[in-house]
Amino acid sequence: MGGTVAKQAAPPSVFARRLAEARQRAGLSQRDLGLLAGMEPSVASPRINQYEHGKHEPRGETLQRLAEALGVPAAYLLTDDELLARLLLQWKDLTVRQKKQVLKDVEAALAAKG
């Protein structure tokens, strides 16, 4: 009757998961990412580790520096929409003309729907 219930670890936040995935895709260590984002060498690895384990999340400027170091839009690190995340990864490689065409296509699709 007085048994204990095992506590399940909460799943990592969207940010934690995307940060770890993007870092691994970029082939960077936690320390290297922290250094590229402008962190002091003594805190670079522990801070990225805390971010990836969901213990802390960066604010504005740090988030932007992490995204730049990883070559991804900051919005990619935050969105919980998988399709949008995939689009954001591709978006940076499109020309302005291609981006305008994508927007035009989406607007046309929405107009046809409504």
Image (cartoon, rainbow, N blue to C red):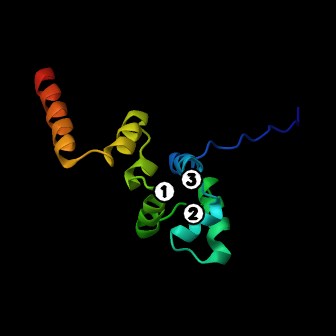
CB-based contact (under 8 Å), mark 2 and mark 1: yes
Amino acid on which disc 2 is placed: Leu
The residue indicated by pointer 1 is: 70
CB-based contact (under 8 Å), mark 3 and mark 1: yes
Task: Give me the residue at 57% from left, 70% from top.
Answer: 35
Left-right relation of 3 to 92: right
Instruction: Work out whether residue 103 or residue 82 is closer to the camera in this orientation and state it.
Output: 103
Helix, strand or loop at label 1? It is helix
Helix, strand or loop at label 2? It is helix
Mark 3 or mark 1, earlier in chain: 3
Amino acid on which disc 1 is placed: Leu
The residue indicated by pointer 2 is: 33
Q: Position of residue 108 (x, y in %)?
A: 12, 29
Which quadrant, please, contains the C terminus? top left
Classed neighbour count for the residue bearing mark 2: other residues with Cα under 10 Å, few (<14), some (14–19), many (≥20):
many
**Cα separation between marks 3 and 1:** 6 Å
Classed neighbour count for the residue bearing mark 1: other residues with Cα under 10 Å, few (<14), some (14–19), many (≥20):
many
- Residue 1 versus residue 34 in the image, above or below: above
The residue indicated by pointer 3 is: 23
- Residue 46: which disc? none
